[in-house]
Amino acid sequence: MKTRIPIEVSARHIHLSKKDLEKLFGKGYKIKVLRKLYQPGEFAATETIELQVNSNRFPKLRVTGPLRKETQIELSQTDAIFLGMNVPIRKSGDFKGTPGAFLIGPKGKVKIKRGIINAWRHIHCNLQEAKKLGIKNGDLVSVKTKGTGSVTFHNVMVRVGENYKLSMHLDADEGNAARITQKGEGILLNQKEK
Ligand SMILES: [Zn+2]
């Protein structure tokens, strides 16, 4: 049986810690919802910050909520090349050996020592969806995208969470390679062990 997976392409963005948020926007500041994202509780915020690496910068990097324990910036490989830096492929929250940057907000600046990643391509799903698909948390699977620009992505990490809804997340480069601008669809091809 073929299994359809909705695909969403994530633009570059930043998740802020409370500490860094307050340094950038002032004490007690609360970020506001611009647009709810498909995963429950996740949202694009109205706020942006400036990201600086050496003399290169992204002047309006979108803040994504809710707040995280530690600040995390998700960039594509094209973004990394633009900034002139090496950004490793990492799971969300895995910051060992990742580069940092200067962040500039309306009320202040902060230098983070680490936290920039190229997010490991992944599928979000809840336990029921995972069971139905025959996959489990941490599995690496392959997904073939639909359409004229169809490509197959390997090493797609399965992330099972109680509140997740089935969807695959790609970065902008991956989306471009598959000719998917914001939303698309793929077929789960196989499962293999970690
Ligand atoms: Zn995701």
Image (tube, helix red, strand yellow):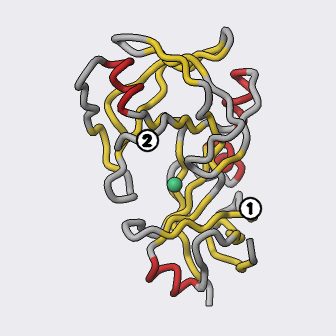
| Neighbours of disc 2 within 10 Å: few (<14), some (14-19), many (20+) | few
Q: Residue at x 74, y 61 (%)?
A: 151
In the image, residue 68 sits, relative to residue 154, either above or below, namely above
Of 80 and 18, nearer the camera is 18
Helix, strand or loop for disc 1: loop
Asked if the residue at label 1 sits under 8 Å from ligand 1, the reply is: no
Residue 144 at x, y = what percent?
69, 69
| Neighbours of disc 1 within 10 Å: few (<14), some (14-19), many (20+) | some
The N terminus - image quarter: bottom right
Which residue bears the numbered disc 2?
Answer: 69
Helix, strand or loop for disc 2: loop
User: How many labels, in total?
Assistant: 2
What amino acid type should be assigned to the residue bearing mark 2?
Lys
The C terminus - image quarter: bottom right
* Comparing labels 1 and 2, the label whose residue is closer to the camera: 2
Residue 24 at x, y = what percent?
38, 18
Residue 47 at x, y = what percent?
35, 27
Residue 53: assigned label: none
Q: How far apart are labels 1 and 2 at the CA level?
A: 35 Å
First in sequence: mark 1 or mark 2?
A: 2
Q: Residue at x 37, y 40 (%)?
A: 67
Q: Are marks 1 and 2 in contact (CB under 8 Å)?
A: no
Of 91 and 18, nearer the camera is 18
Outermost residue, bottom side: 1
In the image, residue 186 sits, relative to residue 17, either above or below, namely below
What amino acid type should be assigned to the residue bearing mark 1?
Val
Is 51 on the left or on the right of 155, as rendered? left
Q: Residue at x 35, y 12 (%)?
A: 106
Which residue bears the numbered disc 1?
Answer: 151
